[in-house]
Amino acid sequence: MSADRAIWGRSSLHALTVSAFVLGLFSYWFGIADRYAIFLYGHLGAGPFDSRTVSRYWMTGLVASGAVTVLYAIANWFAGRIAGLCWRRYVPPPWWQVWVLSLPWLIAGIPGITMTLNSPTLPFSLAVRCAAVAIIGLALALMPGKTAAQQPGELLWLAAAGLALSPSLLLLRAFEGANVYLPATRAYGIALGSNLIGGAVACGIGYGYRILRRNVWKTGHLIVGALIWSYLLAPLVHHLFLTPPRYRYISVADNFFASTPTVQALCFLALGVQAWLVVRVQQKKCTGSGYMPSANG
């Protein structure tokens, strides 16, 4: 019983730290920073509440979650290495406990910030959308923490495979721009070619992992990896490195998500199929060698 209380106590400390960081970013973006720079008011005639600007508001949740992904993984990696120097094993609290304990802070804090600070303030429905996106993103952001602390090599393998699978989410939708932004042949070439190459690379990485580590991934781990690369880290990289230094604006959702639910669902389906194929390649090799290792937990 005391052990459970200790775990929840550490989870509370992690949740408080993570929540304070996320709310600090929201306070800066919505309360301190120049709205014309962060959300590009006036760019191509955009107003505070047109569809593109609205998407910038809720994309802040993904950018913040991307920052949490990087910093939380690094913090857990350092904690694991320091514990190792003392001949101890660092065990971070379960990610879901940290996430659950962060919910009250984010549910109350993000609407409170976005509905009261600076001008114009956000309406309740849009403030709730910002909070919901941040909450979903935070769940993904916290997942790599334990692996970073205890098995950083495993995290690198999964990160490489997830990056290889990310074209299923980021580039398959390129065919939406056929004869609009790109010639049809080029649009379809990007959409299909990137997925074929990415899937083949991911299978190669999975095969190499199986040979060297004698283990098999879970499909869900690969899906999470691709989601983190595509929807957390890519928006963060765009915000920090692909914008002018004086205008570190938040990207529109169209740069990362399909414009229709049908195409977005197709992207998710393609990711699931490719992740399943990577695991099947690993399992095929295991069966052929007469060795069936257990998947990572």
Image: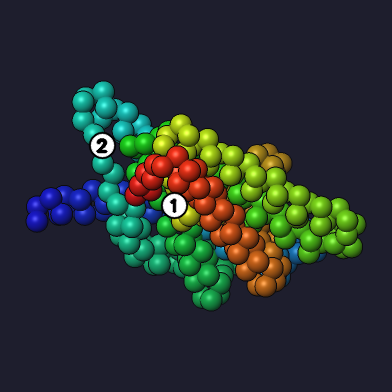
Between disc 2 and disc 1, whose residue precedes?
A: 2
- Residue 1 appears in which quarter of the rendering? bottom left
Give residue 154's position: percent from left, percent from top.
Answer: 42, 38
Camera-side residue of 65 and 41: 65
Residue 7 is situated, as x and y percent measured from the top left of the image, at 20, 50
In the picture, measured across the screen, residue 176 lies left or right of residue 283, that is right
Say few, some or many: other residues with alpha carbon within 10 Å of mark 2 (under 14 / 14 to 19 / 20 or more).
some
Residues 135 and 109: in front is 135
Image coords of residue 170 (percent x, y)? 67, 54
**Percent position (x, y) of residue 118?**
56, 61
Instruction: Write down the quadrant of residue 23 in the picture.
Output: bottom left
Give the farthest residue toward the left. Answer: 1
Residue 244 is left or right of residue 140, and the answer is: right
The residue under label 1 is which amino acid type? Lys
Q: Disc 1 on helix, strand or loop?
A: loop
Residue 32 appearing in the image:
no
As rendered, which of 50 and 112 lies closer to the eye?
A: 50
Residue appearing at x 58%, y 59% in the figure: 273
For residue 88, which quarter of the picture? top left
Residue 266 appears in the rendering: yes
Residue designated by label 1 = 218
Q: Is residue 133 above or below residue 189?
A: below
Residue kind at label 2, given as amino acid type: Tyr
Q: Is residue 109 left or right of residue 66?
A: left
Secondary element at tag 2:
loop
Q: Residue at x 81, y 57 (%)?
A: 188
Q: Which residue is mark 2?
A: 90
Q: Is residue 181 above or below residue 197?
A: below
Distance of label 2 from label 1 (alpha carbons): 24 Å
Going 29% across and 57% down the picture, which residue do you hit? Answer: 97
Mark 1 Cα within 10 Å, few/some/many (few <14, many 20+)? some
Nearest to viewer (mark 2 / mark 1): 1
